[in-house]
Amino acid sequence: MVVIKMTASDVARKVIENKELFILDVRNKDAFHDWKIEGHSFDYLNIPYFDLLDGVDEILPKLPTDKDILVVCAKEGSSLMVAEMVSEAGRDVFYLEGGMKSWSSYLEPIKVGHLTGGGELYQFVRLGKGCLSYMVISEGEAAIIDAVRFTDVFTNFAKEKHVEIKHVFDTHLHADHISGGRHIAEATGATYYLPSKDAEEVVFNYTPLEDGLTVEIGASQLEVGALYSPGHTIGSTSFIVDSRYLLTGDILFIDSIGRPDLAGLADDWVGDLRETLYHRYRELAEDLIVLPAHFMMIDELNEDGTVAKRLGDLFADNHGLNIEREEEFRHTVTDHLPQQPNAYEQIRQVNMGKILPENDEQTEMEIGPNRCAVR
């Protein structure tokens, strides 16, 4: 039997296309329970690598014969060794190239829809981390919203589409992942926008992102409009694109709402969060399609792999938007905050420009699940 590598891109297609996959995860049990590759039709067996050093005979009966088997570890080495042992026992098996490190960094670009004048809107889905970035394209120009740190993905995609990146936005100062926004702007000459209320400690130049700012993309003047929407951070800003799409940043998700505590100010910002969700957003058209900056669960993906839902449907179905009493809302939010994101304070320092860690250190900072939502 031959051991074949499976790339993060291959796994992403299995997730999006709802294909079956059996994952033999050989990381330690706590790492597996904290964060794993999620798929609609995936099954799992978690056996730490050190428990398999004497062989894989005991687990062979637990491995299916009717679906692909993928061995996964943190960085690849251990999974390759286990996969070789499974193969030598006569079973077809794959290993994940680059391990969970590669899964965490992979981005899948998916077209959300057409825009006025032949424009397009793309969502970049980071399945391993739950991050969502966006590119608005119109007549040779592009704007990027909430780019993650893998800048080549965005610049290469723009080249493929023969467009020039003119504007780069961050909806807020991120705390769970490292932004690539200002680096894309530096590389392309684009204007980089950041909410000024989130930027008091940044050490680089930026253009203030203020409520009501309208940026036109392309000769057709496709509009990207800014809507001040504090609560996750004091500067959080949403965008309305082409009067059709509401990019909510980390304020509103498909199945939850944003957490207000990542700068240590939950009690101060929870009121702003309610004001945004229950008043500012309620004034918007319910037919707007909500496009958040994160997702928490694989069930939030649509059949085409996008994460998007009509605002009116969220008003009806999202529990965080249906807590009538303000005091109950305050307790619901502050009493159900999940564990802080991995290295969130260091990530904030990176996004302020105060520290510049090496690439491997940035990877370690971001390892783990997304934790931007109230549970």
Image (cartoon, rainbow, N blue to C red):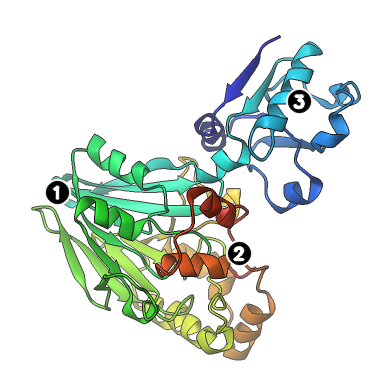
Task: Please name the residue shown 59% across and 52% down the image.
Answer: 364
Going from N to C along the chain, the mark reached first, 3 or 2, is 3
367 to the left or right of 283: right
Q: Amino acid at mark 3?
A: Val
Q: Quadrant of the C terminus?
A: bottom right
Return the residue nearer the eye: 330 or 73: 73
**Is residue 364 positioned above or below 227 on the image?**
above
Residue holding disc 3: 82
Label 2 secondary element = loop
Q: Amino acid at mark 1?
A: Gly
Task: Please name the residue shown 73% across and 24% down the image.
Answer: 81
77 to the left or right of 279: right
In this rendering, does residue 235 appear at all?
A: yes
Badge 1 crowding class, 10 Å Cα cut-off, few under 14, some 14 to 19, many 20 or more, is few
Return the residue nearer the eye: 147 or 278: 147
Of the two numbered discs 1 and 3 in the rendering, the one whose residue sits closer to the viewer: 3
Which label sits on residue 341?
2
Badge 3 crowding class, 10 Å Cα cut-off, few under 14, some 14 to 19, many 20 or more, is many
Q: Position of residue 179 (x, y in %)?
A: 41, 59
**Is residue 124 positioned above or below 181 on the image?**
above
**Is residue 3 positioned above or below 231 on the image?**
above
Residue holding disc 1: 117
User: Gap in Å between the C-alphas at discs 1 and 3?
Assistant: 53 Å
**Is residue 227 positioned above or below 9 on the image?**
below
In this rendering, does residue 127 appear at all?
A: no
Task: Please name the residue shown 58% across and 88% down the image.
Answer: 267
Q: Using the rendered view, name the quadrant where residue 228 is placed.
A: bottom left
Q: Position of residue 353 (x, y in %)?
A: 39, 67
Extreme left residue here? 219
Label 1 secondary element = helix
